[in-house]
Amino acid sequence: MYRTAVMGDRDSIYGFAALGLDTFPVTDPVEAAKQLRRLAEGDYAVVYVTEALAAQLETEIDRYRAQRLPAIIPIPGVSGNTGMGIRNVKKSVEQAVGSDIIFGGN
C-alpha cells in the first residue's frame, strides 16, 4: 500500500503527523535530496515538500517529474505561499497542451 510523506522545516510539517502522514523534518538541502531519493525509491506515492525546500531541490524534483510516482507537490510553509505551486501547474499544463490555457499567456 502506498504512503504519503511530508518534507520541510519542522514548524511547517509537524501538524501533518496528526493526519497520519509520515513527516520528515529536514533543513539541510543535501540531506533533503538524499531523503527525497529514499522516499521516491520506497513505497511513497505522494511527497509533499514545503515550497522553500522545493526551491532548493529543483534539480532533484525534476528527476521525478516525468515519472508516474511519486507525485511531488509543493505546499506553503509557515513563511507563507511563494506561488511555486501554481507556477508548477502552469508549467505542466503548457507542456501537456503546448500553450498557456490557464493564464492566457500572462
Image (tube, helix red, strand yellow):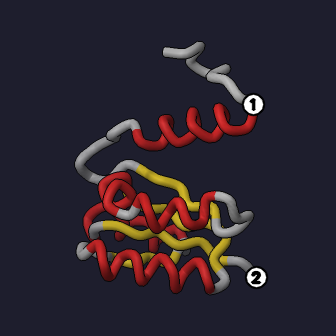
Q: Rate crowding at label 2 as few (under 14), some (14 to 19) or many (20 or more) other CA atoms within 10 Å.
A: few
- 57 left or right of 66 in image: left
Residue at figure coordinates x 37%, y 48% from the top left? 76
Label 1: few (<14), some or many (≥20) within 10 Å? few
Q: Amino acid at mark 2?
A: Met
Confirm or deny contact between disc 2 and disc 1 (CB under 8 A).
no
Report x, y in % for residue 66.
Answer: 68, 59
Disc 2 target residue: 1
Q: Quadrant of residue 30?
A: bottom left
Q: Which comes before the other along the chain, label 2 or label 1?
A: 2
Q: Please state the horizontal and vertical placement of residue 22, each as a whole percent of the image.
A: 50, 78
Q: Callout 2: helix, strand or loop?
A: loop
Disc number lying in front (2 or 1): 1
Element under label 1? helix
Q: Is residue 14 above or below residue 98?
A: below
Placement of 38 over or under 104, stated as above or below: below
Dot label at residue 97: 1
- Indicate the quadrant containing the N terminus: top left, top right, bottom left or bottom right: bottom right
Q: In the picture provided, is 18 more to the left or to the right than 79?
A: right
